[in-house]
Amino acid sequence: MPLEFGLWRVDDDRPKRVATRPMALESRLEDLIEADPDILGKRLLLIGRQVPTDHGKFIDLLGIDAEGGLHVLELKRSRTPREVVAQLLDYGSWVQGLGNEDVREKYAAYARARGLAEELDEAFALRFGGGPPDVLNSTHTLTVVASEVDAATERIVTYLASGYQVPLNVLFFRHFEEDGRSYLARTWLIDDVEAVAPAGPQGRGKQEPWNGKDWYVSFGAEPGGRAWDDARRYGFVSAGGGDWFSRTLRSLPVGARVFTHIPKTGYVGVGTVAGEALPFQDAVLNVDGESRRTTDLPLKGDYRSGTGAPDAEDREDRREWVVPVEWEAAVPEGKALWRTGFFANQNSACKLRARFTIDEVSRHFGIG
């Protein structure tokens, strides 16, 4: 039977039903959702409204969740169940082919039209508290938004979603009114976990492309340990204390461009890897045109903890590993650059795909 529910106000332990009032709700729902997407009951960042597809149709609302999955929201309005469900399935066949750049372009167009921050990374971080995942559109969900649901729609959606794992659901709103105040109530036809499916085989390009050159480096400056003043002055980055911390840094190739970040501080330097990683006690750096052993330099930090090679029992390499870097730009820690939406990662080094971070840091430091 069609989904239905009521609303009661409780006064002095006596329930009083709030009247359902007719309202041109579906004509307003698009505005209401855009004004506050949280009324959907799931946290989304809207990235498009009336989004044109390649088939001459327009998606009412397009959103993205914290995991990078896309959400297509289509208002039922006065269409029949067959029409609205068929339209959503058609949209799904188009959405699953959107790559990383496509998603970013959709958001940029939406943001420009509304005077919002035009970079997805920044808007994503403001909404979810962190940058977007490497892969966008890994899943997609199709949602019918309606003020009422007839039995035929329930049957079709339940059949496709529950029987064939089609990522299809219905979000049902009902309007109530009392004493001049309006209320909205909502419910989902199917439990949310049942309505998410992989985006399908047409997922190529959903990871932000890597330019083959740029790397992220996390420089864990700490009191009594490694010091950024040393790295900036003598040209290196380093990591140690265990295999997990040094392994990724040791993989940096000569010639890589490194964007160096101090955790909880910001980006402090960009440079080019000038040599292979070596343990601190073996490393040699080019200082003012002269080769100098790191052990002979007047360093502010301490890099000698765990200087021995891993023993047979521990097998853990806790040495500090040093990678020589020729800085294109490097600033004191107090002048670090940080913006909402910048890329940060707990690994000591990884490929840097975040175009927003690369562009803004390069612009700030005057690097081409």
Image: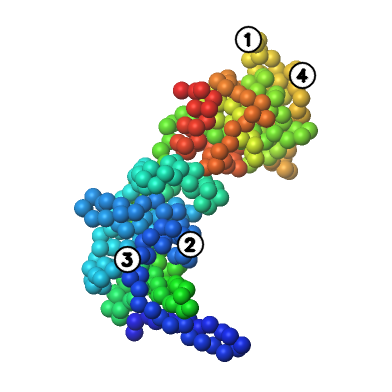
- Quick one: 148 or 219, which is closer to the camera? 148
What residue sits right under mark 4 in the picture?
Answer: 298
The residue pinned by badge 2 equals: 38
Comparing labels 3 and 1, the label whose residue is closer to the camera: 3
Q: Which numbered disc, 3 or 2, marks the residue that appears first in the sequence?
A: 3
Q: Quadrant of residue 150?
A: bottom left
Query: What amino acid type is highlighted by mark number 2?
Result: Asp
Residue found at the far front of this picture: 180
Instruction: Give the foreground label among 3 and 2.
Output: 3
Q: Are marks 4 and 3 in contact (CB under 8 Å)?
A: no
- Is disc 1 placed on a helix, strand or loop? loop
The answer to whether 154 is drawn above or below residue 262 in the figure is: below
The residue to which callout 3 is attached is 27
Regarding mark 3 in the picture, which secondary structure is present there?
Answer: helix
**Against 233, is 113 above or below?**
below
Kind of residue at disc 3: Ser
Q: Quick one: label 2, few (<14), some, or many (20+) residues within 10 Å?
A: few
Amino acid type shown at disc 1: Gly
| Residue under pointer 1 | 289
How far apart are the alpha carbons under marks 4 and 1?
Answer: 17 Å
